[in-house]
Structure formats: structure tokens, C-alpha cells
Image (cartoon, grey):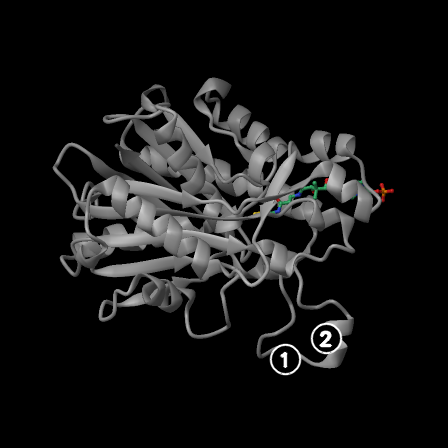
Amino acid sequence: MSPTFSDKARGASRILGTGRCVPEEVITNEDLEKIIDTTDEWITTRTGMKRRHKVAEGEATSDLAAVALRRAGEDAGIELTDLDAIIVGTASPDMPFPSTACFVQQHLNLPGIPVFDISAACSGFIYGSTLANSLIAAGQFEMVAVIGAETLTRITNYQDRSTCVLFGDAAGAAIFGPSDGERGVIAAYIGADGNLSHLLNMPGGGSREPATHETVDARRHFIHMEGSEVFKSAVRAMESSAKRAIEIAGIRLEEVDLLIPHQANVRIIKALTSRINIPPEKVYINVQEYGNTSAASIPIAFDEARELGIVSEGSVIVMVAFGGGFTWGSLVVRL
Ligand SMILES: CC(C)(COP(=O)(O)OP(=O)(O)OC[C@H]1O[C@@H](n2cnc3c(N)ncnc32)[C@H](O)[C@@H]1OP(=O)(O)O)[C@@H](O)C(=O)NCCC(=O)NCCS
């Protein structure tokens, strides 16, 4: 049974502001050529990636997340003390517990409000946004921050050439507040299939395989991925999610001004684009600059697209994600 989007949830909230934080240090394809058996040509043709960013020594996911949220608050023109909740989507938390959201709250000195993480891997921002909209629709909260934040370079195995070229660090944030009727979230759709959890995960460090010398030696505390299986599922799930969300929104494809897909691989994005049949100029791609930043990829792309003036008030934007779990989802907003 697929979840539905109620009339109460439709248009309940709108995005008041966005922000992003990208660490300064850059890992280029040429840098990777020096540490593993790869080439710029292979990485570029198979993934579209040229660069990815990396946090500084001692920096953690919450540090990036707090900066992104502060910038989103400035963009929205609100005081962060007006927030009623903070939701962080991440697969690379500061610690297994407490939540990364607790550290974000601490950095920004916002004690009191509820804060929590969502574990939906690369779909974390879409899951968090869907929840934020529902909480606002229910009258529980008025203003909710959703952050997608990752330091994937911390859990990337730089001895595995099939995964280490893919991932980067960043954070993106959006602030959801009451809608003014015209603008807002006009559809949200999320789903998952835990049967496919073995294809993309970090096996070590949880209750199934607690950390031991053996798990560390076996490099179990890094991302494990079966790339080609993930690739096929990603295209299928993002296609059906985007189509479903557009259908729920009750809009025609021609009314979509911009598609922001999760930036996992340019070939996944191109396959998705042709299946949905949306013109390439309406698809935002920045994977060449950041690699796959998991939950951060959609909010940083969204923030960039707003900054560049690619979207503005009234634009209809479809965001679509896919991630470990597997999880997937799509959000349609009228800015
Ligand atoms: C990872 C991915 C880029 C690999 O591309 P691919 O075309 O599927 O490549 P394969 O895994 O079939 O590997 C093909 C060959 O390239 C090699 N290869 C893998 N990584 C390489 C690298 N960095 N440099 C050079 N060669 C590499 C493989 O060893 C293999 O060699 P072989 O044929 O001699 O065995 C691709 O599967 C992918 O993007 N998957 C989805 C990943 C993803 O998006 N994950 C996150 C989802 S949210």
C-alpha cells in the first residue's frame, strides 16, 4: 500500500530560505589517480565527477550542518530562535548517539526545541522535508529546519576504487514555515525496500557487528556498495517517485521548471531524465563539483539553483532522491 498525500498536507508549508556549507579542501580526480588505480578519464565518463570536497581534520557533520542552517536562517530573514524543530538527515553522524541534530542545536545555542536525525541515507532530505511539511500541516509546529549533512569521506574506503571516487562532504539546509496559500509543498512521496539493504550499507559499528579489531582490520566501518545493482534500482525508483509525485501534485510535466535529482552519478541522472522525458535544460546537475554528498546533495543543489536565479518565486521544482535502504522519495514545491 503506497502512502498518500492528504489534502491537509498539500500546501501546508513553504520553503522560507535555504543555505549550504561546503568544506574548502578539494579532492580532484588527479588526486585520486595518485592513491588508487584509476584515471580522470574513467571517473569522468563513468560518473561525471571531477571534484569532491572534504572536511578539515577534527571537523564533523554537525559543524557543516550548523553553518548551512545559519545561512538558511539569514536567507529566510528569520531568527533561528523562531524554529520549532530541527531535523537532520545523515548517514555519517557525528556519533551513533546522540543525534547529530543535538550537536547542531548545541552549536547554534537553541536549547529546548525537539531535534532529531532521520536515517534514510541519500533520501534523508526528502524524508525530512516530507515529515516537516506533515508536522506543520498537523499544527504541531510552525517552523521546522531540515538539514541534509554528510561527511562521507570519513566512512569512505580509499582502498576500494569502485566506491572511493564517488563521495564528498557538504551540508544543505531549508527552513519550512507556514504557507501563504499560493506557494508551498504541493506533493511529497516517500518509500523504501529493506530487502535490498545488503546492496549499500556500512556493515560495521552497529549492534550486528560491533567494532572490534577484526572489523576494523576487515574495513567493515566503511561504505560497502554493489554499484551496478544500485545503479539500476536508483534509476527505476527515482523515475517512479518523480512520476508519482508529479501525479499527486496534479500538474503537467510541462509545468515543471526544474528537476533536482539526487546527485549520485551523471549517468543515473541522464537515464532518469530520458525516462521521465524532461528536457535536459530543466535538470540541475552539479555532481562534477561535489561528487555524491548523499543527504546533502539535493539541498545544496536547490540552494545553488536559487542563488543562480535558475528558480525564483512561483517556480515549480521537483526534487527526487534514492539511497541506501533502499529508500526513495520525491517532493514537489512551488517556490
Ligand atoms: C560505481 C559505478 C560508477 C561503477 O560503474 P560501472 O560501469 O557499473 O562499473 P563496474 O562496477 O561494472 O566496473 C567496471 C570495471 O571498472 C573497474 N573500476 C571500478 N572502479 C574503477 C575506478 N575508480 N577506476 C578505474 N576502474 C574502475 C572495475 O574494477 C571493473 O573492472 P573489470 O571489468 O576489470 O572487473 C556505477 O556502478 C555507479 O555509479 N553505481 C551507482 C552508485 C551510486 O550512485 N551509489 C549511491 C546511490 S545513492
User: Residue 122, how many percent across, how many down?
Assistant: 50, 50
Please indicate whether residue 233 sits to the left or right of residue 262 in the image: right
Which quarter holds ligand 1? top right
Query: Is 258 drawn above or below residue 27 in the view shown?
Result: above
Choose top left, top right, bottom left or bottom right for residue 57. Answer: bottom right
The residue wearing badge 1 is 210
Q: Which mark is residue 296?
A: none
Rendered-image quadrant of the N terminus: bottom left
The kind of residue tagged 1 is Pro
Counting the numbered discs, the total is: 2
User: Residue 244, how many percent across, how many down?
Assistant: 38, 38
Helix, strand or loop at mark 2: helix
**What crowding class fits label 2: few (fewer than 14 Cα within 10 Å), some (14-19), or many (20 or more)?**
some
Residue nearest the viewer, comparing 304 with 218: 304
State if disc 1 and disc 2 touch (CB < 8 Å): yes
The residue wearing badge 2 is 215
Residue nearest the viewer, comparing 178 with 242: 178
Please indicate whether residue 173 sits to the left or right of residue 249 in the image: right
The kind of residue tagged 2 is Thr
Query: Is 293 drawn above or below residue 224 in the view shown?
Result: above
